[in-house]
Each structure stands twice: as C-alpha cells, then as structure tokens.
Image (cartoon, grey):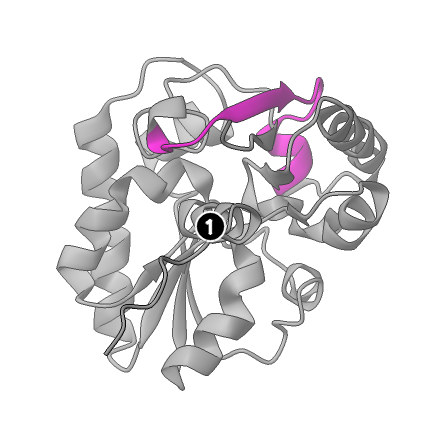
C-alpha cells in the first residue's frame, strides 16, 4: 500500500478546490488530514500566536502515531514552528512551501518571487526559520484582494467565487512581474493559491514551486522503487 502523508490543517470551512492540499484529488497517493482546533488564519498568519505551537505538536504526534510516512502543513506561515515540529515526530515533516526558497534560489541563481497570503504578516523571522533570510525575494500578497480576504483570511463565507479569486491572483502576479522583471522563479506560500499554479506559470513563463511540488518530492523520496535491470549492450 502506498504510504500516507499527514496534513496539519487550519480551522477553516471554505471550499477546497482541486489543487488545494486539503482536496484529496490533488494527489495520487493517500493523505490523512488533522484539523488543529483553534488554529484560525488570523491567529497563525496575522498574530503569529506562539500558543499554537503546542496543539500543532500534539496533532503532528497523533498523525505520526496513526502511521503516516511524512507530515506537511496546510498553511505556509507554519514555517515559524518548523524546527519544533520536525523535532517532535519520528517522520519527516515539512511545514511550509517556504522551505524551498533557498533551494530555488540556488537553482535559478537570481531573485525569487514570493506570493503570500498577507505580505504585511511575513517577517524576517519566517524566512530565517528555514535559512532563507538572505534569499533575494520579490514579495506580493493577497490580503488586499476582496475575495481572498473575505473567504480565506476572515472566513466571512464558505462559498468561493473561483473566477473572482483567479482574477485577483492574475492582478497580483502581473504587478509582481511588471515591478520585478528579473525574476527567475516563483514560490507560492499560500496553500489556498496552489490551484492557480498552472495559470500563474502561463502568465510568468517561470518555474513555480508550492506545497504540492514539495509534498510530491517528499513522497517520492519516501517511496523509492528499484530500477529495472540494465539491458545488456
């Protein structure tokens, strides 16, 4: 049986469309979700509430005890707890797509775009948590976009207007490309925006990394298969 990946989730109720880490159709391997009670977007993203560490550690340990092969997170701002969470469980744990930032920078040798939920909430602490404090980053965020703010950040309603959100993503990405023409790649911090990764790549013509690319890579590392025997020459 294919190993299961555990996902630490925030307490949200809006629609999770294909491509979102909380939509099982996003992956071709099994996933197990664990919602952390009280972990709202406001508390984690905007308040960086340190008291959330304990319930996230508890949830991660419960997933590990349930037999998952690795654990990830459904919010990139979990990066603040990366070291503590990884140390708390006996399986690999990658809390955030931001873990990829140093690798992506080294791969492309230039500035990296970063699309986040709330640009005002991202601090040097978040980048330092994964050794990305010296990565040249061009930042843009979605907190000023009505559909994203009302549904994802503030939880005013559960029904998502996908077309409206897509247009908001287009506007932020286009502005980022216009203001930073030297970008070499883009990392999507926010798991809610991964469903638009293909659309973003079509607009930018750049490599796009996110929590799904990271989770697929980690799953591949956890499920190595033997290569076929070499053919005789």
**Residue at image coords 18%, 40%:** 167
Is 180 in the magenta?
A: no
SS label for mark 1: loop
Instruction: Please give the range of residues in magenta.
Output: 26-45
| Quadrant of residue 194 within the rendered picture | top left
Q: Is residue 189 visible?
A: no
Q: Nearer the viewer, residue 226 or 143?
A: 226
Q: Nearer the viewer, residue 1 or 180?
A: 1
Residue 231's x, y, as percent? 27, 68
Is 29 in the magenta?
A: yes
**Residue at image coords 71%, 17%:** 37
Q: Nearer the viewer, residue 55 or 143?
A: 55
| Quadrant of residue 85 within the rendered picture | top right
Residue 153 located left or right of residue 175: right
**Residue at image coords 55%, 33%:** 3
Quadrant into which the C terminus falls = bottom left
Mark 1 Cα-neighbour bin, 10 Å: few <14, some 14–19, many ≥20? few
**Residue at image coords 67%, 71%:** 131
């Amino acid at each position: 049986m294919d190993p299961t990946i555990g996902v630490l989730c925030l307490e949200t109720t809006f629609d999770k469309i294909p491509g979102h880490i909380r939509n099982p159709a996003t992956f071709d391997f099994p996933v197990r979700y664990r919602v952390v009670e009280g972990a709202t977007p406001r508390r984690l993203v905007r308040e960086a509430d340190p008291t959330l560490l304990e319930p996230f550690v508890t949830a991660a340990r419960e997933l590990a005890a349930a037999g998952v092969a690795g654990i990830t997170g459904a919010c990139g701002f979990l990066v603040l707890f990366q070291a503590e969470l990884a140390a708390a469980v006996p399986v690999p744990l990658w809390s955030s797509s931001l873990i990829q930032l140093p690798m992506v920078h080294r791969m492309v040798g230039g500035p990296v775009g970063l699309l986040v939920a709330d640009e005002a909430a991202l601090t040097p602490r978040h980048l330092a948590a994964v050794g990305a404090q010296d990565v040249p980053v061009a930042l843009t965020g979605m907190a000023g976009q009505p559909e994203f703010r009302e549904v994802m950040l503030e939880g005013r309603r559960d029904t998502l207007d996908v077309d409206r959100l897509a247009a908001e993503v287009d506007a932020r990405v286009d502005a980022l490309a216009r203001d930073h023409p030297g970008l070499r790649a883009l990392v999507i911090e926010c798991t809610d925006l991964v469903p638009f990764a293909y659309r973003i790549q079509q607009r930018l013509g750049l490599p796009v990394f996110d929590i799904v690319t990271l989770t697929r890579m980690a799953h591949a590392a956890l499920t190595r298969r033997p290569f076929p025997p070499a053919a005789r020459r």
